[in-house]
Amino acid sequence: MNRRDLLRAAAALPLAQTVISRPAFAQAYPARNITMIVPFPAGGQADLAARPVAMALERILGKAVIVDNRAGGGGGSVGNAAAARAAPDGYTLLMTLSSLAVLPEADRLFDRPVAYEVSQFMPIARVLADPTLLAVPASAPWKTAQDFVEDAKKRPGQITYGSSGPYGTLHVAMEMFANSADIKLLHVPFRGAGPALTAILSGTVQAIAAAPGTLKPQVDEGKLRVLGNCGAQRIASFPDVPTFQELGYKDVEMYIWAGLFAQSTLPAAIASRLREAMAQVMASPDVLKSFEASGSLVAYQDAPAFSQFVATDSARLIAAVEKIGRVE
């Protein structure tokens, strides 16, 4: 598998088209309820992004937008594939994460049938783009990331961490950190960030990488402690948490972005209507307050900018997967 093949998915991502005139059939859209697939259980970043957006879209479009948590397959592949196969009519949308481009490459890495291709999707709008954070139980002995690394080096493969599934966003973030720190951790995959969070709170695993919005309520209640930030800069919701780059792990940078997608063959006029609606959604005070309360900052991008962002970020993540190689 050469480098050219690895970057194929990112390069193939289509730009959503801007439409000046809209056919009459698109003006009637939507004529019925819309399903928004979230390829993870409730409680994770994609679900956190989907629910306020769905409520706001209902008000703007005048039809119910039903969130469908369709987990399975590891890292969101089942829900992503279901959205890719859906009719390109604007009635099945996908709110997914940055693992979208990684999962097909993981399938190739393990010589598995590829569940979907990134080229089957059209970006509509980016909603959130948070760095992943390393968290441990508040009762854990590690007060800093350095403490965690030192202990892991003494006990290779004994510290467990939970993820949303193999080669999902949380798995890649932790393996990126482990590679940079030269430590070996024990990966315990779950069906999404929500179950992984439940696992660390119950003591089933000892660490997790997750989005700020997922972790903040648990940190505020004194249940979890955050040790490190995979972003390039510190964030307002956790201002005292250093970045891994600050700590000397220069190649650790991982964001858990959430964005809305449709099928690549969606009629351009319907795509334009969805883009217009999402611009209103992401300016809605209710949506802004919801994300602010959760500890996530709105990171809205319309389709052209989001398409370019996805292509660039996906290429970086695919390169990281190539470096990580085959891990369970």
Image: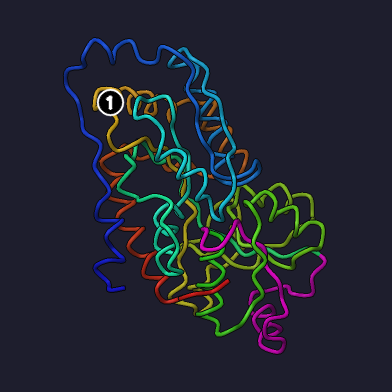
From what the image shows, is residue 14 above or below residue 30?
below
- x and y percent of residue 39 in the render? 54, 43
Image quadrant containing the C terminus? bottom right
Amino acid type of disc 1?
Ser
**Magenta residues (range):** 139-168
- x and y percent of residue 216 in the render? 67, 50
Q: Which residue is mark 1?
A: 272
- x and y percent of residue 210 in the render? 60, 56
| Residue ID at (25%, 52%) | 12
Q: Is residue 114 magenta?
A: no
Q: Nearer the viewer, residue 78 or 140?
A: 78
Instruction: Determine whether, in the image, residue 312 is placed left or right of residue 80.
Output: left
| Residue ID at (57%, 33%) | 68
From what the image shows, is residue 316 above or below residue 219?
below
Q: Nearer the viewer, residue 188 or 18?
A: 188
- x and y percent of residue 146 in the render? 64, 80
Image quarter of residue 90 = top left
**Which residue is most to the left?**
20
Image quarter of residue 29 = top left
Q: Is residue 156 magenta?
A: yes
Image quadrant containing the N terminus? bottom left
Q: Secondary structure at mark 1?
A: helix
Q: Residues within 10 Å of mark 1 (few under 14, many from 20)?
A: many
Image quarter of residue 225 = bottom right
Instruction: Determine whether, in the image, residue 328 is placed left or right of residue 224.
Output: left
| Residue ID at (30%, 28%) | 271
